[in-house]
Amino acid sequence: MKKKIIAPFFVVAALMLVVSQVSFAQDMEGKFGIGARVAYINYSNDGDFEFDETAMYGGNLTYFVQRYLSLELSVDYVETDVDLEALGVSVDIGELEQIPILLSLRAHLSTNPKVSPYLTIGVGYYLNDFDMKDSIPAGYDIDPDDSFGYHLGGGIEYFFNEHFAFNFDLKYIWSNVDFDIKTPVGYSVSDKKVDVDAFTSGVGFKYYF
């Protein structure tokens, strides 16, 4: 997992060093952007819970506070199959549905007018839901609470012209979710805090106006 995370960040860092040799001539201050993206998300499995790798889709709004600083608000949607390890056996118990709402601060590095590499830091609020597998016996239920998280990352934005841009970014997300687990035996309820950390890599397009 660590190799999957470290290698892409080295690639982005190298690209930033290459393209940051020319001064940033395009002034984006005061501009808004609206975009859509698709991403690959790889969850870091936590103990008994295993989350499948999957795709994530979403949209975003961007505002350049000044030439080298922008804010981005994004809303995504993702579903991932969840396996539970019990007595050495892995059982598919259902799907975790997440709607991440992320607010990111992006620091843009000096570059040429068409290429804008950046570093990002931010916080997120995650709307969580769980859909139990039909094969799970009646009486069992899992109800995840909504959760908070934070993230770090980087990316590159390539401008085709003053309005249209292509975006590639990487993020690592730290988050944990409280799962309320109900069992049919006396309808007991147990709370389990699960780390739902994840690495994401995504591409998208934006329109600035």
Image: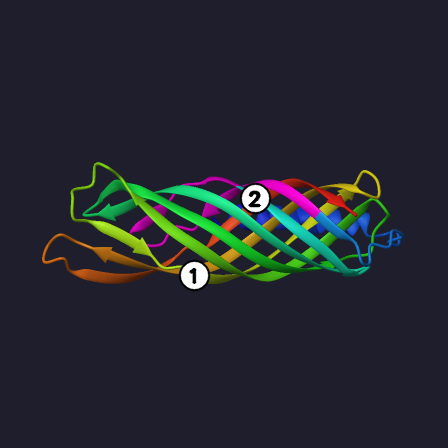
Judging by the rendered image, the residue that carries numbered circle 2 is 58
How packed is label 1: few (under 14 Cα within 10 Å), some, or many (20 or more)? some
Q: Is residue 58 magenta?
A: no
Asked whether, in this view, residue 116 is left or right of residue 106, the answer is: right
Q: Tell me, yes or no, whether the two marked residues, 2 and 1, touch with CB atoms within 8 Å.
A: no
Residue beneath the point at 44% across and 55% down? 127
Q: CA distance from mark 2 to mark 1?
A: 19 Å
Residue beneath the point at 52% across and 49% down? 199
The kind of secondary structure element at disc 1 is strand
Asked whether, in this view, residue 96 is left or right of residue 55, the answer is: left
> In the figure, 154 relative to 131: above or below?
below
Nearest the eye: 163 or 113: 163
Residue beneath the point at 18% across and 47% down? 87
How packed is label 2: few (under 14 Cα within 10 Å), some, or many (20 or more)? some
**Residue stretch rendered in magenta on the structure:** 34-56
Q: Position of residue 52 (x, y in %)?
A: 40, 41
Judging by the rendered image, the residue that carries numbered circle 1 is 147
Q: Earlier in the sequence, mark 2 or mark 1?
A: 2
Question: What type is the residue that disc 2 sits on?
Answer: Gly
Residue beneath the point at 49% across and 62% down? 149
What secondary structure predominates along the stretch shown in magenta?
A: strand
Question: What type is the residue that disc 1 sits on?
Answer: Ser
Q: Position of residue 162 (x, y in %)?
A: 84, 44
